[in-house]
Amino acid sequence: MTIRFTRILALVMCTSMLMLSSCTGRKIKNEEVDYPIPVFDISASGDGILYKDQLLYYFDYDNKTAIPFCAQPNCMHDTEDCPALNHYDAYLIVDKKLYAFEPTSNKQIDEDTWHEQANLIMADIGGTNKKVLATFDGNLMFTGAPPRDSNIYYYKNSIYFVTSSLEIKEGISTNYSIWYAYCYDIHKNTLTKLGELCSGYNSLVKVQGMIEDKLYYYAHFSDKDVDYKDYINEDDFFAELDKYLKEENSYLDLLTGEIHDSDLPNVTYESRIFAGYYFYNNDKNEFIARRLKDNIEIKIFEEPCSYYYWAGDRLMFFIDETSAEKSDFEWESSIYYWIPNTNKIEQIPNRTDGIIFSPFIMKDEYFYGIATYPEEQGIPYLSYAKIEDLTEKDYEITKVE
């Protein structure tokens, strides 16, 4: 069964094959970790994985099968009332309930100005008994790109998310957006607007990570409207935009709603926070993990890291090994993992058969993720493999059909 993710990172699909050395897998559930969990367009729960193909599918861990996310009797999954055809922006399963985001009608601000809105909905497994829990300003951005970037986090029975509300004048979208942060408390059934993160023309907010009381993010925006349609080529557009674009690395205090300059060292556009750790390259070009609860730092690697993401109980990271003699098309990297609990670092050997597997969901003895196969011309598939088998170069990997 092919997976047509709209925003899977190209780097994940182009790097060398990911493999793990022998270890014991453990069940990772929302209730078992004490840090915020990012939500993607492939979403894991305690019982299975929800993901999009032509339809929305649910993969069951126990029987290793995927079925359309639809509980309607005799449904052929070809009509708009089929739950598996709903085009949610993002989704997660909590306590056997589906929580998902979907666009709704725009909100009128004045006679000729409208702003985008969206809904947070809840439904039973299979999409039945759907109801709208809350309506909020903006649409969701960067909900995909697993397993690295997301603007949605789940933490202690609450869903935190960042939206972009695009301004629409006389039926035409402008380049002006307002970015908000929200929190929906599942138990209290309340939506709280935490603050406005950024506003302006050609604006962007990318969440760098979240801890218990702070949401870190990068933002850029312009006070001047530089319209892409006014330029013959994109180089001229970006050159003009660079004259006006402002950049900020900040954090939102989740308790007070105040915004402050980032308090992290060497923060860049690519900086990320996973599982309570801030990862960065220091002034010596060493790859560092800073535990944010006590600011203790651990040197992970003596070279800077080009790309990394969190998978189960460990950090997967890539070290660029491209030499000056090689072209951009001959880019190479070595792949490692780091386990905080044991401070164990291991290099991950490359496969020889051309399969590229990116594991990022750990459940019992298996790692689940996305893989491309040489014979499938780069189309990504949901796939899985046993953790204990991953020390072999060409271990058994199963493609979900």
Image: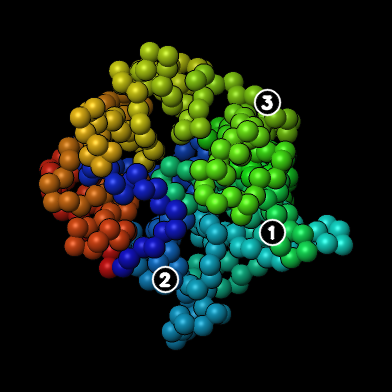
Q: Are marks 2 and 3 in contact (CB under 8 Å)?
A: no
Q: Is residue 347 left or right of residue 223?
A: left
Q: Is residue 279 toward the left or the right of residue 314 in the image?
A: right
Above/below status of 12 relative to 61? above
What is the secondary structure assignment of the residue under circle 3? Answer: strand
The amino acid type found where label 1 is placed reads: Ser
Disc 2 designates what residue? 54
Task: Identify the image quadrant of residue 109.
Answer: bottom right
Q: Residue type at mark 3?
A: His
Question: Looking at the figure, which quarter contains the N terminus?
Answer: bottom left
Dot 2 or dot 1: first in sequence order is 2
User: Measured from the top left, where is residue 225 in percent x and y?
Assistant: 70, 45
Q: What residue is shown at x 25% (from left), y 42% (from top)?
A: 329
Q: Earlier in the sequence, mark 2 or mark 3?
A: 2
SS label for mark 2: loop
Amino acid type, callout 2: Gln
* Image quarter (top left, top right, bottom left or bottom right) of the C terminus: bottom left
Q: Which sits in the foreground, 189 or 38? A: 38
Question: In the image, which disc is placed on residue 98?
Answer: none
Model colouring: rainbow
Mark 2 neighbour density, 10 Å: few (under 14) some (14–19) many (20 or more): some
Q: Which residue is mark 1?
A: 173
Seen in the picture, residue 297 relative to 69 is either above or below; the reply is above
Query: Which of marks 3 and 1 precedes in the sequence?
Result: 1
Q: Which residue is mark 3?
A: 260
Mark 1 Cα within 10 Å, few/some/many (few <14, many 20+)?
A: some
User: What residue is shown at x 68% (from left), y 38% (from top)?
Assistant: 222
Local secondary structure at mark 1: strand
Residue 67 visible: yes
Residue 185 percent across, percent down from the top left: 66, 48
Residue 302 versus residue 383: which sits nearer the camera? 302
